[in-house]
Amino acid sequence: MSKKVRYYDSFTDDFEQTANQNFKLPDNYKWVRTDILSKALSGIIYGLAVIFGGLYCKCFLHLKVTGKENLKGVKGGFFIYGNHTQPVGDVFIPALCVLPRRIYTLVSTANYGIPFIGKILQFLGALPIVDNLSGIKELNRAIEYRLNKNHPIVIYPEAHVWEYYTDIRPFPDTAFKFPVKFEKPTFAMTVTYKKSKLFKRPVMQVFLDGPFYPKGNTQKEKVKFLHEKIYGIMKNRSKNSDTNYIKYIKK
């Protein structure tokens, strides 16, 4: 039996809203910090987060990862696309999947409005998603900088967290413009949930598939190819889930 039931109108419903949902980045926001103090703080905060995340994901989410060997041989930065099913765990799951590499993640600017957490997001590797032209240019520069430093970039194309959701929600082609623009390989990271014999909460099994490279004659064709490839892989992998810890019902 499901522990909870959630009702939704559309796949874009947001069940996890922050205290300051309309937060805006300051005009002087520094997208890439290269000073010694910022690097030191970032290293310490990220390291502590990975340690905490490892314990949290293993003990609370019962994380298992399949397909880490697919990352071997991939040089330089790349993109990871995952389904968004854990409000806390999704911060750590991709980081644990690609260790010892360090990830950077596209996040909503609303997260910067969360007390305390918002202040350290940048040190954790957050790249805020913005909707103005100057901000988009800065975001692209920051992504390019991190890719050139051989870091993976994590994207949750479903945008909103649906905790313990076991299917894959639709997401737009535009989510795949980055790997096409920067000509980098792409991986699918699909989170699934299996019934546990020992715990009330299900076991989380994560599948890493790839690398995938865009095909097509135009940018539009390449974006569409990646979208269909990643979405298809994730839909197929999601069939491994066999339990609904939280049941979602359309109104």
Image: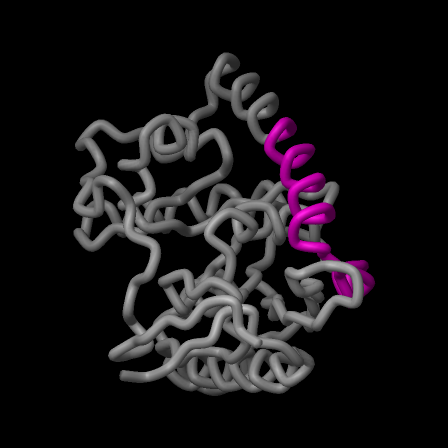
How far across and how far down the image is residue 245, in percent?
A: 56, 69
Q: Position of residue 86 (x, y in %)?
A: 51, 56
- Assess whether residue 21 is covered by the magenta stretch: no
Q: State the image coordinates of residue 39 (x, y, percent, origin top left).
A: 53, 21
Q: Residue at x 33, y 43 (%)?
A: 111
Q: Is residue 133 left or right of residue 31?
A: left
> Furthest-top residue in view?
37
Residue 239 falls left or right of residue 38: right
Residue 232 versus residue 136 in the image, above or below: below
Front residue (pair 172, 13): 13
Which quadrant holds the N terminus?
bottom right
Residue 80 placement: quadrant: bottom right
In the rendered image, residue 23, in percent from the top left (x then y), is placed at 20, 41
Residue appearing at x 43%, y 65% in the figure: 162
The answer to whether residue 109 shows anywhere in this view is yes
Q: Is residue 219 visible?
A: no
**Residue extent of the magenta highlight:** 47-73
Residue 19, above or below 221: above
Residues 130 and 64: in front is 64
- Residue shown at the point (42%, 51%) measured from the top left: 106
**Residue beneath the point at 42% across and 34% down:** 121
Q: Nearer the viewer, residue 206 or 57?
A: 57
